[in-house]
Every structure is written in C-alpha cells, then in structure tokens.
Amino acid sequence: VQLVESGGGLVQPGGSLRLSCAASGSVFSINTMRWYRQAPGKPRDLVADISSDFTTNYADFVNGRFIISRDNAKKTVYLQMNSLKPEDTAVYFCNMYLREIGIRRPKDYWGQGTKVTVSS
C-alpha cells in the first residue's frame, strides 16, 4: 500500500491550494483519513480528519479556512485550503488508517509529504 500526495506549492497570502492524497495497492477498506503538517523545527500537528461516516474534525488554527473531504471510490482524501497565511507554511502529510486485503487488523499508513509555502 502506498499513499501519494499532490497539490503543494508556493502561494501568496490569502490564496488557496487543494491537496490530494491517493492510496494505491491492496486496500480493502479505509477508516479515518487525516492531514497533518510539520513546520521546520516544530512537531507534527493534526490539521483535520474525516471518518468513514464523513464526520470531520479540525484543529483550532484552521478556523473555518480548510475543508477536508474524501472520495472512497478513488481512495482519496482532499484538503481544500483557503485564506492561506504565512504560518500555514509546512510539509503536509496524509495519513490513512486502513485494512489491506487479507489482513484482519487495520494500521496507519503515511504519505511522503507535500510542501506548502505561503509567501509574497
């Protein structure tokens, strides 16, 4: 199983980006999907998560600016980021708690990260 993120880049303050993370390989089912971020010299923080029933949760710093969504058929999670600020600059990682085909217990998988830079 592999998670591949895309959509990062350089954006001006106030701009928007949409991150995507797709799972591939022998995926049987996906439970919770999450986005984390890590700025240089700081710990990795949870940004948002979405459960299998589409319940969402957001970190306080999101403050209504981001939207997490998922497409189960595509095994993909998205993060729409609006009104971006310089302090949103970080590497963004996706995480999925999923079951592989033929394996009873789900476990965590991580993407390689996509860099988001918010700067004028």
Image (cartoon, helix red, strand yellow):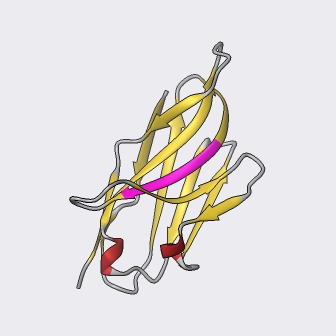
What residue is at 35 percent from the left and 61 percent from the top? 8
Dividing the picture into quarters, in which one does residue 102 lie?
Answer: top right
> Which percent across, then down, holds residue 38?
33, 57
In percent of the image, x 55 and y 40: which residue is there? 96
- Give the number of callouts: 0
Q: Is residue 21 left or right of residue 33?
A: left
- Relative image position of residue 1 (x, y in whole percent): 49, 27
Task: Name the residue at the top extreme.
Answer: 102
Q: Residue furthest right?
A: 53
Tell me which residue sits at (40%, 82%) in the image: 15
Is residue 23 within the magenta segment? no
Residue 9, located in which quarter of the rendered image?
bottom left
The image quadrant where one finds the C terminus is bottom left
In the picture provided, is 108 more to the left or to the right than 55?
A: left
Up/down of 105 relative to 79, above or below: above
Task: Identify which residue, 75 or 42, lies in the foreground.
Answer: 42
Q: Residue 103 placed where, x, y %?
A: 63, 15
Position of residue 95 relative to residue 50, above or below, is above
Picture coordinates of residue 63 (x, y %)?
55, 79
Q: Nearest the camera: 59 or 89?
A: 59
Report the magenta residues as a range. Answer: 32-37
Residue name at image x 53 percent, y 26 percent: 25
Magenta: main secondary structure equals: strand
Picture layout, residue 99 above or below residue 65: above
Is residue 114 shown above or below 105?
below
